[in-house]
Amino acid sequence: MQPSPPSTRPRLTALRDRVLKLAELATTPLLPQDYLDLVDPLRSGAALRGRIEEVHRETRDAATLVIRPGRDWRPHVPGQYVRIGIDVDGVRQWRAYSITSVLGRADGCFSITVKAIPDGRVSNHLVRRTEPGTIVQLDQATGEFVLPQQTPDKALFVTAGSGITPVMGILRNLADDVATDVVLIHSAPTADDVIFGAELRELAAAGRIRLVEQHTDTDGMLDAASIAALVPDLAERATWACGPLPMLEALEQYWADAGVADQLYTERFRPAIVAGDGEGGTVTFTENGLTLEADGSTPILDAAEDAGVLMPSGCRMGICFGCVLPLREGAVRDLRTGEVTTAAPGDGVLVQTCVSAAAGACAIDH
Amino acid sequence: MTVIQKKSDNPIAHLTAEDIELLGKQLDAIRQSVLDTRGEDDARYIRTVIDVHRKLELGSRAVLLASGFPPAWILGTIGLSVAKILENMEIGHNILHGQWDWMRDPKIHSTTWEWDMASPAEQWKHSHNQLHHTYTNVIGKDNDLGYGIMRVDEDQKWVPAYLAQPLWSFINACFFEYGIAAYDLELGRVIATGQTKDPDFRRRAKQVLGKIGRQVRKDYVIHPLLSGPNFVPTLAANFVANVVRNLWSNSVILCGHFPEGVETFEKRSIDGETKGEWYVRQMLGSANISGSKAMHLMTGNLSHQIEHHLFPDLPSNRYAEIAPQVKALFDEYGLNYHSAPMHKQVYSAWHKIFRLSLPNGWLDNTTPKNLPTQLVKLWKMSTGPKSARRRLLQAEAAAA
């Protein structure tokens, strides 16, 4: 899918970089880029950003945002997510959202679909208060929740709530000539709460997919056994599941018991946080000299950011390792497992700050 | 002026320890009220100021390409001076204080920002944020008091070399950024103690020289060259803009801690100082400049020096809003909220520089009428035998 760039491109890029380096003599201590950003924040060579072009309401608590990415954006693989940095109440917040659009849109944009979660600062802001024209920060798309090169003959998607978003990204990009037998089992409180409801029902009516909607307000939750009952040939299908944690854990258990764990791919949106009985403690950052009090249930990443520290970060759910820093001394607790990691003075145990809370005093290199 | 502890009418004698702690709690509450409402409007404010600065600087430099044409020279020089002042005061100083770190924007953050100033951000943050803001107006601890070269207190022994103090002060004001860089390096102390070979000093000195090199090359080589035939006028314009910026920031800083009536403190007095006592020292050791919104912007809101010293990391655009609440606390506790228009504060500060450059009492005892005899006396005080000098100095102080 990668468009092959014209052969002059690398030379032009090198020339541009040299010119910018030279221009730095005239702009120091600022960079020429700081001035170029005033004019064209989406240009090639700029930090990757995007401009929100349109906001469409999907359901009462979900919206699709059409984003024009900067020129250095690389096409995504359907099913992948993108990290977006948006200023909410003046504070830059980063979150990951699945890309839901078709590849190669004529306007060069992509879209994400966001469901407002109760008390979710960022999701509510994106769904209810975002204006077209807003500039957001972007990372390149990433994620493993994608179809294999060889599209399977039979696929099952099990989704709930906003878990439909990466699957919609996949379904919209399934080539017309691929004759995959697709079953989609989707749970939402009511028929109106089904994100992309109309489009999914059309796909089902056209015979492209078999759609099973579970409206949990009236029908209750689906358990793994009833899914198996709905899909008798489950063992022959590659399955992708995305939704709340208890659902994913139940599915993983069921697939493992059935001896087909390798046919199940899951996507988590938030870390599985074990209710911590941790004490918290004083966190010291050895390089910037800052100390802060963190409780036993707040990730060190969040506590540090709240104190104004610029921290490396990534997926914020313990997957990408973009946030790891050396624990020089002390103890931290993994919020997913409750496991405590300790370091003797001078050690440099790498810990994921997005899923680790202080378990007593600790010193972190940053 | 004398350090507060030696004053016969100590302005905080009427406050009990409980008063001071209660005052501290009331100030904490003011701070919290700003933290609770910090948000989108504040973020928009600093981004707007940064945006305006960049456009103004670009525009002024573009106009200066035609600096051979006198109106262009004047317009460009004014624009560039204003841009440089904005960049140092409202933008650089305040970002480096961490006032905007809460936005989590890596481009507007105290750990990543660099400014158009001889002193590298990292070194300035140490001497300014950690030393000056912690030890505000403590004689012998706060180098901002006279930058180590001036007589700032009657209790400092007078020697004839101080007669040149007004001249030094003026030269320092014109080249203020270099003075700051030298004092962030603690150049005077390092040379006096013969530690110029210290590797850490060398590293920092190299950093400063590198920074100065880049700044000088930009203002005095690159932009003049870009102006082609207008090389010299552009160079002159950039020089003037730098001097204007230096004089202005020096004046603002003089107004903040130097006017008559601002208190200074003894080293011993801050041993075991409580948070409440620290607040009181900031309240009495700072002075405000009253004026318009434009004045507040151009001083980087250091016109609210008192509020800034109480809460150095609150966003500068909020100082004006809390100033009435802070003033009310001064009134409640019977303390003097020192605020005056800029020309008065600048006059007061320079008057003090002149007064302290002379022997204690001399300026007060001098009238146009007795000026000739006073000058003769000053000559004797500077050149006479040691014992005679001491006697004259004591008599002069006693007569005042």
Image (cartoon, rainbow, N blue to C red):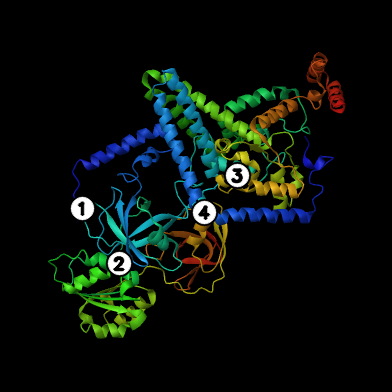
Q: Are the residues flagged by discs 2 and 4 from a single subunit? A: yes
Element marked by disc 1:
loop
Instruction: Classify residue B193 as left or right of residue B297.
Output: right
Image location (x, y in percent) of residue A239 = 25, 75
Three-letter code for the amino acid on which mark 2 is drawn: Thr
Within 10 angstroms of label 4, few (less than 14), some, or many (20 or more) residues? many
User: Which residue lies under the disc numbered 3?
Assistant: B320
Within 10 angstroms of label 3, few (less than 14), some, or many (20 or more) residues? some
Q: CA distance from mark 4 to mark 3?
A: 23 Å
Element marked by disc 4:
loop
Query: What residue is drawn where x is 54% and y is 54%?
Result: A286
Three-letter code for the amino acid on which mark 1 is drawn: Ala
Q: Is residue B193 visible?
A: no
| Vertical relation: B204 (above or below) A295 | above
Q: Nearer the viewer, residue A168 or A306?
A: A168
Residue that extends furthest to the left in the rendered view of this protein: A177
**Mark with earlier residue (1, 2):** 1
Q: Nearer the viewer, residue B341 or A339?
A: B341
Q: Are the residues flagged by discs 1 and 4 from a single subunit? A: yes
Q: CA distance from mark 1 to mark 2?
A: 21 Å
Element marked by disc 2:
helix
User: Which residue lies under the disc numbered 4?
Assistant: A308
Q: CA distance from mark 1 to mark 3?
A: 50 Å
User: Which residue lies under the disc numbered 2?
Assistant: A165
Mark 1, chain letter? A
